[in-house]
Amino acid sequence: MAEKHTEEHTAGYGTYFYVWITLLLFTVITVVVSLMHLGNLSILTALVIASIKALLVLAIFMHLKYEKMVFKVMFFVAIITLTIFIGMTFIDVLYR
Amino acid sequence: MSENEIAGTAHQESYLDYRGKYKGILSWILSTDHKRIGILYMVSLFSFFLVGMCLGLAMRFELVSPGRTIMSPQTYNSIFTLHGVIMIFLFIIPGIPAALGNFFLPLQIGAKDVAFPRLNLLSWYLYMAGALLAVLSLFTGGGPPDTGWTFYAPYSIETGTNVPLAVFAAFVIGFSSILTGLNFVTTMHRLRAPGMGWMRMPLFPWSLYATGWVQILATPVIGITLLLVIIERFFGIGVFDPAKGGDPILYQHLFWIYSHPAVYVMILPAMGVVSEIIPTFARRTIFGYKAIAFSSVAIASVGSLVWAHHMFTSGMSDFARVVFSLLTFIVAVPSGIKVFNWVATFYKGSVKTDAPLLYILAFIFLFSIGGFTGLMNSALALNLHIHDTYFIVAHFHYVMFGGTAFAFFGGLHYWLPKMSGKMYDERKAKIAWLFVFTGFNLLYFPMFIIGYLGMPRRYYDYPPKFHNLNLTSTIGSWILATGLILMFTNLILSLYRGQKAGSNPWGGTTLEWHTPSPPPLENFDEIPHVTGGPYKRTKE
Amino acid sequence: MQESSGHAMEKHVDYTGSKIGMWLFLFTELILFGGMFLLYSVYRYKHPQEFHAGAVELDVVLGAFNTVILLTSSMTMALSILALRKGNKKLSLILQLATIGLGLLFLVNKYFEWGAKIHHGLYPGSEQILQRGKGEILFFGLYYTMTGLHGLHVLIGLAVIGFTVYMTQRERITAEDFVILENTGLYWHLVDIIWIYLFPLFYLIT
């Protein structure tokens, strides 16, 4: 019952290289932005940039983009769960 | 279901007769057969259950009259902690999934084994390692922990007793639980028999599926929390230490983010067992199959949003208390749906009240009491009055013991003939059930009253006005213990003296009844092709 | 025959099944760290100024350098799988070894970074740190715990990649049967992702 792994469903050497360059670029951006002292916005930009980087790693390096739907749904469930855990704790912390 | 295709397997050697590479005990503890692992788990689980039971009896005996009876207050603190740790982490959380789930999940979905058989064995070893560490924690360091099974900070980071080792034990057992959940979820995704769509999967696997997700997504939270307690104790990082700015309420949040969903890890598989036994003994197709299947998932998801109802008196924000109280009321809905469907299944059925069904009927009765008192607990104003009293103790024993453990016992009577190939003595089983049921109510019902009148839980002593009720409760504990011993004796004796059980003694419809009892090593000669729902009955 | 119960030796190569199992395991890792991110976010919300003061003392250059190292190692890991699947065993081995090298470099940097902090008396429970505000005690407590646990994961990842190097060398991992390498890669990328968040959250608080 071995499944055939079809070559065309994965990225090539080039794709990985470009993703790497993009990741480095975002690292530079996040450092530069942090030096601009944006105040409250800085946490938001830092998290957004980190999430973009994480998504790139997930989609390309971890092949999530090429996987079956079930993987994506499962991943979504895990992320939502974590968000809820943190979010609902803040229902307490914010109003205490 | 395809009736006769699999009937030709009777000549095959059963998994018990199979002679592998190893003999004796090694043929068990090195086996990757899901059936043998299930039995390994079952034997270990019930051994710990008996230890926990003895500790419970000791506690009850201490409380038989006010003042000192047999032990010192410090011993009493250790004993209730140990009773909680053993019963929760070593018995009821792994409980049904690890024992009955391991054995019957592959059988019920028509698979030869779980997805990762070696991982399955590893999870048993982790469980045993955790148990060993828990035992070690009693005799090393500062002596047995006295924090209660919740290990609340800051006391757990201050007490001189051996908290780190006990906490680490729970961490290891949690890891074992994760591996079981991960294994089961993958198994159900990949190894269902051809033709068995999700909507043709029996309800016990459905409940294990929901449970598996809770194990995967919630258990790591307790893992990190307990790890942080250890790090806090050794390095003083400050996260739970108010002297260093840490917030003990956050410990409670993290603890209950896992430990409340863990309640559903305990009860969901029990509900799955109930959903298997009722259609068999009512001789009816289950009523509301989809509603039961989806309510398992609903309980698992909504149940993950209600954890802070354990913390109504902890000093968290009022807004959070209102939100969590509301959500707690909502989680009662899917449980109600299940109870309704179970009861509706009996309608126009030809009910046969053998021991498995008796335990299940007791489950419905006791779980309903536990559930309704749970609604009382979730009402904010009332909660302030009964929080940390015996009312809570009664409530969760009705749900966990009256619920989960009764379903476990029912499932044991139901499936033991399949596991061993021998029938137990029905009359003795019924007598034992009567003792268990009576003793249970006598033991725990008075606790509702004592708690409502104001007796706090975990107290060593009490004023004389509570004497009669405490005495009743203690007497109940003796009756219950007698019943349990009768039950276990009867089941164990059946292995030696029991009549041969056919492949389908109860007239069940799911796939496990299509293999011989006990099943052959690889369960099915040929993987069955499923053509209909799991509880469809053909007219014979 | 490894399985004592003597299961028929049909080779069990359910790639999708193995990968589902691995992803489920990764979720548990994610939530394990998630618990600490929860603590982090609550304490940062409570002590924004002191978290900032703590972050100023961390070495942004070193942190950014380590980020680059881990990102690069993630790429070499992904490439090693691709190389193997294209049948280039030698390139795959080189890339796996490169991943190990980068991982080690990351740990060496971490060692010097921690070493310098500890040398200055900045570690949990030290006199230096207890004189500071509660927010800073928490900041450094979390810093050591989270980067420490992350470092432990790097170390475990390195050991596993060492194992895959051996397996690839012995042709137990091949262009046809590489799910172990792929799952190892998944683990390594997850460790990378966690660092992607740790870096701005500890080094770049303004």
Image (cartoon, helix red, strand yellow):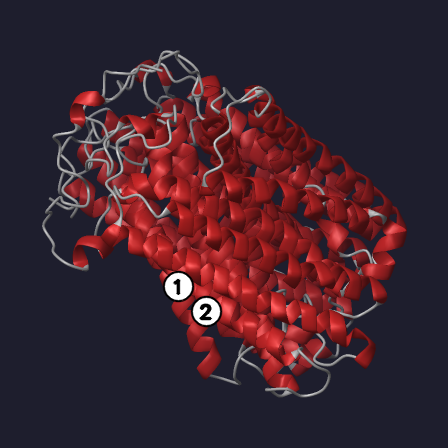
Residues marked 1 and 2 touching at CB (< 8 Å)? yes
The reply, left or right, for residue B455 in relation to residue B480 is right
The reply, left or right, for residue B186 in relation to residue C175 is right
Tag 1: amino acid: Ser
- In front of the other: B391 or C110: B391
Residue depicted at x 62% and y 29%: B343
Residue depicted at x 34% and y 57%: B43
- In front of the other: B333 or B89: B333
Q: Is residue B2 above or below residue B182?
A: above
Q: Position of residue B498 (x, y in %)?
A: 27, 48
- In front of the other: B255 or C159: B255
Res B509 → quadrant: top left
Res B149 → quadrant: bottom right
Q: Is residue B243 above or below residue A79?
A: below
Q: Position of residue B247 (x, y in %)?
A: 75, 64
Q: Is residue A16 above or below residue B181?
A: above
Label 1 Cα neighbours within 10 Å, binned few <14 / some 14-19 / many ≥20 = some
Q: Is residue C20 visible?
A: no
Label 2 Cα neighbours within 10 Å, binned few <14 / some 14-19 / many ≥20 = some
Residue depicted at x 68% and y 42%: B368
**Label ID, residue B51:** 2
User: Which residue is the site of mark 1?
Assistant: B47
**Label ID, residue B67:** none
The C terminus of chain B appears in which quarter of the rendering? Answer: top left
For the residues labelled 1 and 2, the Cα–Cα distance comes to 6 Å
Q: Position of residue C200 (x, y in %)?
A: 64, 47
